[in-house]
Image (cartoon, helix red, strand yellow):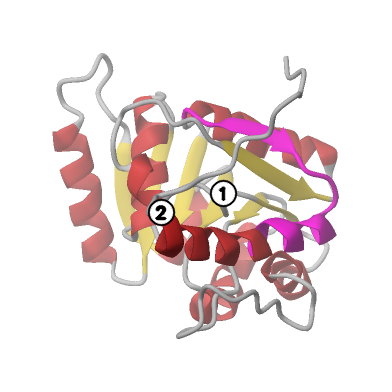
Amino acid sequence: MKVAVLGGTGQLGSGLARRWALAGLSVIIGSRRPQSAADAAAALVQDLAGTKKPADVIGSANADAAKAADIVVLTVPFENQRALLEEAKPALVGKILIDATVPLVPPRVARVQLPAQGSAAQIAAEVLGEGVRVVSGFHNVAAEKLQHDEPIDCDVLIFGDDKAAREEAVKLANAAGLRGLHGGPLANSAAAEALTSVIIFLNKQYGGPAGIRLTGLDVK
């Protein structure tokens, strides 16, 4: 499986790319600056050179990364979401897009501010149309923890109207060393997106980085 991480030079994107490369997946780091993506990919390959299996990571422009991948993950700030989706839309037809966008509106990022559409994930579905299976996830995992190789005690809620597409995203969450959980239809993404602002507040109040863990679930 080839996984493209659009916005993959950022903290969340680079962390996920690292985790998936460690899991043996082919990873394409996408960026609006292709050279930055290529440099990030080369650095990751070098960093993981001592692991059991050489990392299969390359870098390219966002649209090219989306075209070459089987599954695409979007990890960009809210203000860049729509423009990048519109740019990559032709390459996404027939594929699964996992949107990790959180509608944070600076400077009050610790306050829930959901968009009129209900969630960032629903904006993605609106922009891309029926030809793309949109799911969402990875909203509540601390990006800085992904940068290291230690186990992360964190759940990832995955939302989407297509159960099979959700299952693929759950598998990717598990491959990253997290616990992926089906969270229901795409509209439910609003809950996890809103929770990100709550977690930011908690981190400021108590120190962090915090994540979420659900108890009492019999997950096979």
**Image-based side of 102 in relation to 16, left or right:** right
Residue 112 at what x, y percent from top left? 64, 74
Q: Which residue is mark 2?
A: 12
Q: Which mark is residue 20?
A: none
Q: Is residue 139 magenta?
A: no
- Residue type highlighted by circle 1: Phe
**Image-based side of 23 in relation to 185, left or right:** left
Decide if residue 168 is in sight here. Answer: yes
Q: Are the residues flagged by discs 1 and 2 in contact, CB closer than 8 Å? A: yes
Residue 58 at what x, y percent from top left? 30, 45
Q: Count residues near mark 1 (Cα–Cα under 10 Å), then give few for <14, some for 14-19, many for 20+.
A: many
Residue 21 at what x, y percent from top left? 36, 32
Q: Is residue 143 above or below residue 19?
A: below
Tell me what residue is drawn at x 28 percent, y 29 percent.
55
Q: Count residues near mark 2 (Cα–Cα under 10 Å), then give few for <14, some for 14-19, many for 20+.
A: many
Under circle 1, the secondary element is loop
Query: What is the quadrant of residue 100 in the picture?
Result: bottom right
Tell me what residue is drawn at x 68 percent, y 43 percent.
157
Which of the two discs, 1 and 2, labels the residue nearer the N terminus?
2
Q: Is residue 190 magenta?
A: yes
Among all residues in the image, which is located at the extreme front?
206
Q: Which mark is residue 138?
A: 1
Q: Nearer the viewer, residue 164 or 122?
A: 122
Q: Nearer the viewer, residue 77 or 23?
A: 77
- Residue type highlighted by circle 2: Leu
Under circle 2, the secondary element is helix
Q: Which residues are magenta?
A: 177-193
Tell me what residue is drawn at x 81 percent, y 56 percent.
188
Tell me what residue is drawn at x 42 percent, y 34 percent.
20
Q: Is residue 196 above or below residue 150?
A: below
Query: What is the quadrant of residue 87 in the picture?
Result: bottom right
